[in-house]
Amino acid sequence: MSAPNPDTTPAQAPRQSKVFVYVDGFMASCDGMVAPRTERYTGTMLFAIRDEGIDIEVAGRPQRVQMALLKPFVPKAMNAAAQPFVSIGLNPTHPKYRAYTRLEEPGYVTMPRSLFPALTDRLQALWAGHLDIPQARRVFEDAIDEVTQMLPPLRPMDPRIDRVTASLAHNPRQPLEALADKACLSYYRMSHLFSNEMGLSLRQYVLSLKIHAAARCIGQGLSLTATAHEAGFTDSAHLSRVWTKAFGGPPTRFLNPKAFTIQPTNLAPPTLEHAA
């Protein structure tokens, strides 16, 4: 399978941005984007489709990059109006998420595309629309595997925090204080240990579950009111505030079929109540 060379393809009108929403992350291909400052909960990988790279600002530092790995919650803005790229995000539920929380200050790493020639070809094929749903998932998995192995290895996670995350996966609606019993710790000690192990607070972790549930509800065509209820937000205004901080625009922007298409991945969205 070969993709057209994006460095020689004539300019054309922007297409829909294509978004794949998975249980453990997301992947998006885009012809370009200008977005204000965001602070995403995901560990993020950005891949420029063209050799010229994409213009981003990370932690207040403007630069042009071919590839970038971003720490969760590091401030990022994009000024890539006509610079196509693929973005991959790892949710806190992904087993390799913690590697991105350990990125040293200022919270990002840049790399040349030449380090991953085979992966670059497949990302170009994804951007060009040549891959089906299963092929796209394999690109998602292989990109994470190939790139993350360039980062320092992680020690195993404390089994008590494993029990906490497993409990939240089974029942995200339970009060956070009840999780301390699962870890056989006081709530204060559990919260401190969770932050050290996962690289984000327990409440941020639960909020990330809500945001991701909302993304999957939006992908199924639910209204904002229904999405807010299903994902566990107080109301649609609460959802909009949290979503805009993470993604740089209100969720209504992602409901516009002329701008975005969210690919079905046959994964039913979890229902979350007010756990945080």
Image: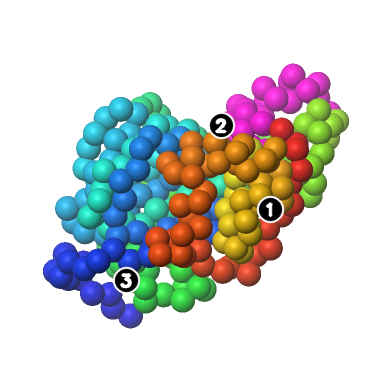
Q: Secondary structure at mark 2?
A: loop
Where residue 125 sits in the image (x, y, percent)?
A: 33, 71
Q: Which residue is mark 2?
A: 199
Residue sitting at 67 percent across and 40 percent down? 235
Residue at position x 21%, y 59% from top? 50
- The kind of residue on which mark 2 rests is Gly
What is the three-letter code of the residue carrying label 3? Ala
Relative to 151, residue 222 above or below: below
Which residue lies under the disc numbered 3?
128
- Where is residue 147 drawn, in percent x and y? 40, 51
The foreground one among 187 and 10 is 10
Residue type pointed to by label 1? Ala
Residue stretch in magenta: 183-206
Our reading of the magenta stretch's main secondary structure is helix
| Nearest the eye: 205 or 159 | 205
Query: Residue at coordinates 46% horizontally, 76% vertically from top-left?
Result: 132
Nearest the eye: 129 or 231: 231
Residue occupied by mark 1: 226
The answer to whether mark 3 and mark 1 are in CB contact below 8 A is: no
Q: Say if 131 sits above or below 23 in the image.
A: below
Q: Nearer the viewer, residue 145 or 227?
A: 227
Figure quadrant of residue 157? top right
